[in-house]
Amino acid sequence: MRGIMRRRCRACSNLDSGFTLVELLVVIAIIAMLVTLLLPAVQSAREAARRTQCSNNLKQIALAVQNFHSARDRIPDSHNYEELSSRGWTCLILPFMEEQAIYDVLEPYFNGKYPQNTGLNHPALTAAMAQPIPGFRCPSDASASLVTSTDQYQWTGREVALTNYKGIIGNNKMGGAGVGVEDCHRSPDCPGLFWRFSFMKTLRFKNISDGLSKTFLAGEDLPRYNFHSALYHGNGTYSSTHFPLNYKPDPPMPADWPTSITFRSDHTGGGLFCFVDATVSFINDQIDFGTYQALSTRAGEDLVRGYTP
C-alpha cells in the first residue's frame, strides 16, 4: 500500500510541476495578441502628447509675437542676406520666449552685413547659429532628433540650428511655382506677415483687416523637405500656401526652393497653425484650397465662409 501511495504522489508531483507545451503556446499567443492590441493605443497616446507639445510651441510663438508687438508697436520683421544682417523675425521674439541669453549673443550683430562676414555671418556667431531651441522643433517630426544641419541655403557646410515653424508669407508663388499671387518674396510687400524683405514694410496688427482670428501667423514645415529651415536666418523662417498643405514630393526635393518653401507636417491628416490672435488649430490637409490660401493673407478682403478655428 505504501508503495502504491508513493507512486501516486510522484505522479501528482509530475503533473503539477509546470505548463505543458500546449499551455505555454496558448499563453504566448495571448500575450502576443495583447501586445498587438495595446501597441497602437500606446503609439496613439504618444502622438497625442507630441501634438499637444507642438501646439503649445506654436502658442508660445504667437504670444511672443503679440508681446513684441505690444513692446515695439509693430510685427517683427526679417533682414535679407543680400545687403543686411540676414537675421530672421524669429531672432526678435527670443526675449519673449525666455531665450534672452541667445538673443544677447546675436543682437550685437543685427546691424552687420551678411555679405561682408558680419551680421549673422560673423565668425563669432558660429556656435550661436548652431544653438537649437526646443520650442522651435515639432516632436512629431520624424527627424526631430536632428537639431542642426549643414545643408541649409546660404549656410552650406556650416552648422545651423533648425526650425519646424515658419511665418506666413501668404499665397506667394515662390519662383513662379504653384498657385497664388506673383512672387513677392524679394519685394517690399507680400500678402502675409513675414518674408525676406519684410524690413522694408512696417506691419502692425491694425493692418490685418481680415481679422486676427482669421489670419495665419505661423505653421509647420519639415526641414528634410526644405533646405530653407535655418532657425535664425531671414531666408529660412517663412513659407507659402502656394501648394496644398502636406505637399511632400517623393523623393523629397529640399533644394528645389520654388516647391519646397511650403507647409507640411508629420501629424497624420494635416498640420498645426497658429493665428495672429494666438489660437492654434489643426488644419486638415483636405481643407478647401481657396480657404487655405485666404487664411494666409492679412488683407485679402476674402471672406472665409464656414471656417471656425
Image: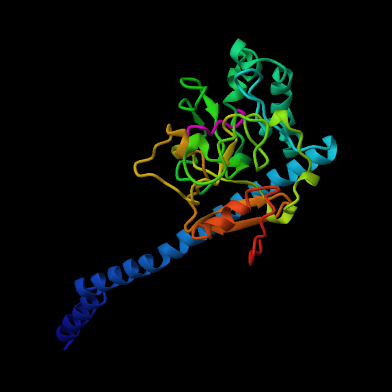
**Which quarter of the image is occupied by the N terminus?**
bottom left
Looking at the image, residue 112 lies above or below residue 244: above
Which is more toward the observer, 33 or 180?
180
Q: Which residue reaches farthest top?
A: 116
How many marks on residues?
0
The answer to whether residue 146 is visible is no
**Res 88 quadrant in image:** top right
Task: From the top left corner, tell me how far across and down residue 175 is, in percent.
Answer: 49, 34
Query: Where the C terminus falls, by quadrant?
Result: bottom right
Front residue (pair 3, 63): 63
Q: Percent position (x, y) of residue 81?
A: 60, 21
**Residue 178 in picture, x, y percent from top left:** 47, 44
Q: Is residue 7 above or below residue 195?
A: below
- Does residue 280 sit above or below 133 in this rendering? below
Residue 179 seen anywhere in this rendered image of the structure: yes
Q: Which residues are magenta?
A: 226-234
Tell me which colouring the rendered structure shows: rainbow
Dominant secondary structure, magenta: loop
- Residue 230 coordinates in the image, percent (x, y): 56, 30
* Residue sitting at the far bottom: 1
Indicate yes or no whether the magenta region holds residue 208: no
User: Residue at horizontal 61%, vertical 16%?
Assistant: 114
Q: Nearer the viewer, residue 184 or 262?
A: 184
